[in-house]
Image (cartoon, rainbow, N blue to C red):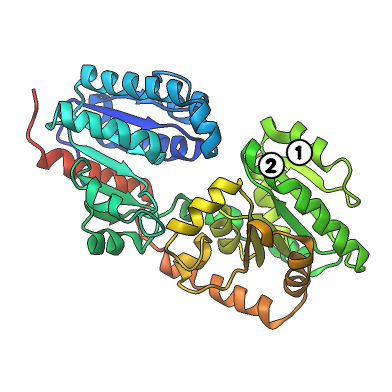
């Protein structure tokens, strides 16, 4: 574990989404443990980072924009925020800049900072999906990022092959939550008991809710028509609960809508199966040992772009980490109840398809293992190492 030198250090961190805010807060806590009162934090973050003492430059809710059309509408505001963030970094003259995820925003800031003051070291926490699309970004990143902190075990090798920056696998934050995903004896019994708990995960953003709720309702209706009885549970975020309730009001099978992380994980621990929008949640379900069917429905232009640039055989994180397409996925026009129901019925029963997923998921602990150190500890080690290699700019 890298130790601090006792020299005062100023860390500028930028996170613009809740997942990045969580990573940033854990990193701040670890760096404060190493540096104590010598650590000073400035930048942009959410509630968790503010709880660790960060006074954010502006609310990160301003940047919670999804979809190409939404970005186009908000472009003037986004460009203004990029300029403001860049100016704040240059004015603060930090010892290091840590950008966290959200590459469409954070990388634009990083490029400007590197051009204006090349002496500020830059670490990127969460690699962009260079292995999935636009692989040329890896080589381009090497010009303005000194080190990448990767959440997925295969990413360092991808950056090496693509000519990207130095990259270290630090581990996914889900590793630290494994205990909250493993069912106890009572929850294991519930997984095996009728009616089976089916977890529904249409997404965590308003655009995703709009795009997916209808097909989720149609799928529940089709299951009911075929005599498949399920206990449907739909975890969502508090600020989306009203929108979700309104969309589910006409469903023939009323789901139990729960809010908050604790309630979501409790549902995972009792779930027999899941129907989920693709994303990080697929990895969370896999670690919890929940077989799933996945889907993604975006706008027509997003689908057109994806078909031309995506270069991986699956967009499901669980599949990519395992290295095998065990989780079925349906995209765009494939997202129909007629396609989803047969596959869901298969994994709700004791079938070869269900067994195949469970056997693959059992490998994840070993694949994603980081030894005795937590992701935030390894991330702090790398940040301190990069600090030591760059020449002081003052």
Q: What element carries label 1?
A: helix
Q: Residue at x 57, y 73 (%)?
A: 326
Q: Which is nearer the N-term, disc 1 or disc 2?
A: 2
Toward which corner of the image does residue 247 lie, by quadrant?
Answer: top right
Q: Local crowd at mark 2 within 10 Å, few (<14), some, or many (≥20)?
A: some
Asked whether 312 or 343 is in front, the reply is 312
Q: Is residue 28 left or right of residue 159?
A: right
Foreground residue among 129 and 26? 129
Q: Please determine whether, in this image, residue 325 is positioned above or below residue 310.
A: below
Q: Which residue is drawn at 49% across and 31% down?
A: 72
Q: From the viewer's perspective, is the residue at label 1 or at label 2 nearer?
A: 2
Classify mark 2: helix, strand or loop: helix
Mark 1 burial class by Cα count in 10 Å: few <14, some 14-19, many 20+: many
Quadrant location of the C terminus?
Answer: top left
The answer to whether residue 32 is visible is no
Mark 1 lies on residue: 244
Q: Is residue 213 toward the left or the right of residue 174 in the image?
A: right
Where 308 falls versus 245 (above or below)? below
Q: Residue 97 location, x and y as percent?
A: 25, 32
Above or below, comparing residue 363 to residue 72 in the picture? below
Q: Position of residue 16 (x, y in %)?
A: 44, 32
* Front-most of residues 49 and 135: 135
Residue 135 has which mark? none
Residue 107, compared with residue 366, is above or below; it is above
Which residue does the numbered mark 2 point to in the structure image? Answer: 209
Q: What whole-number distance in Å separates the C-alpha atoms at marks 1 and 2?
A: 7 Å
For the residues bearing labels 1 and 2, Cβ distance under 8 angstroms: yes
Residue 304 x, y percent position in the rendering = 53, 52
Q: Position of residue 166 (x, y in %)?
A: 21, 53
């Amino acid at each position: 574990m890298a130790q601090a030198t006792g020299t005062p250090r100023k860390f500028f961190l930028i996170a613009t989404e809740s997942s990045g805010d969580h990573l940033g807060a854990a990193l701040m806590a670890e760096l404060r443990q190493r540096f104590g009162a010598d650590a000073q934090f400035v930048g942009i973050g959410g509630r968790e980072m503010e709880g660790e003492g960060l006074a954010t430059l502006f609310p990160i809710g301003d940047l919670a924009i999804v979809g190409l059309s939404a970005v186009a509408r908000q472009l003037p505001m986004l460009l203004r925020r990029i300029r403001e963030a860049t100016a704040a970094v240059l004015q603060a003259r930090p010892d290091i800049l840590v950008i966290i995820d959200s590459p469409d925003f954070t990388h634009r800031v990083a490029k400007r900072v590197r051009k204006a003051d090349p002496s500020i070291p830059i670490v990127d926490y969460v690699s962009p999906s260079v292995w999935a699309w636009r692989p040329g970004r890896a080589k381009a990143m090497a010009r303005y990022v000194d080190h990448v902190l990767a959440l997925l075990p295969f990413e360092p090798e991808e950056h090496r092959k693509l000519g990207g920056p130095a990259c270290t696998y630090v581990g996914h934050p889900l590793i630290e939550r494994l205990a909250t995903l493993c069912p106890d004896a009572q929850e294991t019994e519930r997984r095996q008991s009728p009616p089976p708990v089916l977890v529904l995960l249409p997404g965590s953003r308003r655009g995703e809710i709009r795009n997916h709720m209808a097909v989720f309702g149609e799928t529940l209706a089709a299951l009911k028509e075929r005599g498949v009885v399920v206990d449907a549970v739909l975890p969502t975020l508090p600020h989306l609960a009203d929108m979700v309730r309104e969309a589910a009001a006409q469903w023939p099978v009323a789901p139990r809508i729960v809010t908050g992380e604790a309630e979501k994980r409790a549902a995972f621990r009792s779930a027999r199966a899941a129907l989920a929008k693709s994303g990080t949640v697929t990895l969370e379900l896999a670690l919890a040992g929940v077989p799933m069917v996945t889907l993604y429905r975006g706008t027509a232009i997003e689908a057109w772009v994806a078909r031309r640039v995506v270069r991986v055989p699956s967009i499901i994180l669980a599949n990519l980490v395992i290295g095998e397409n065990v989780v079925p996925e349906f995209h765009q026009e494939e997202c129909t109840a007629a396609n989803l129901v047969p596959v869901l019925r298969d994994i709700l029963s004791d079938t070869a398809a269900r067994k195949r997923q469970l056997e693959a998921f059992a490998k994840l602990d070993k694949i994603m293992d980081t030894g005795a150190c937590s992701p935030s500890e390894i991330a702090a080690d790398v940040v301190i190492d990069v600090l030591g290699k760059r020449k002081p700019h003052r």
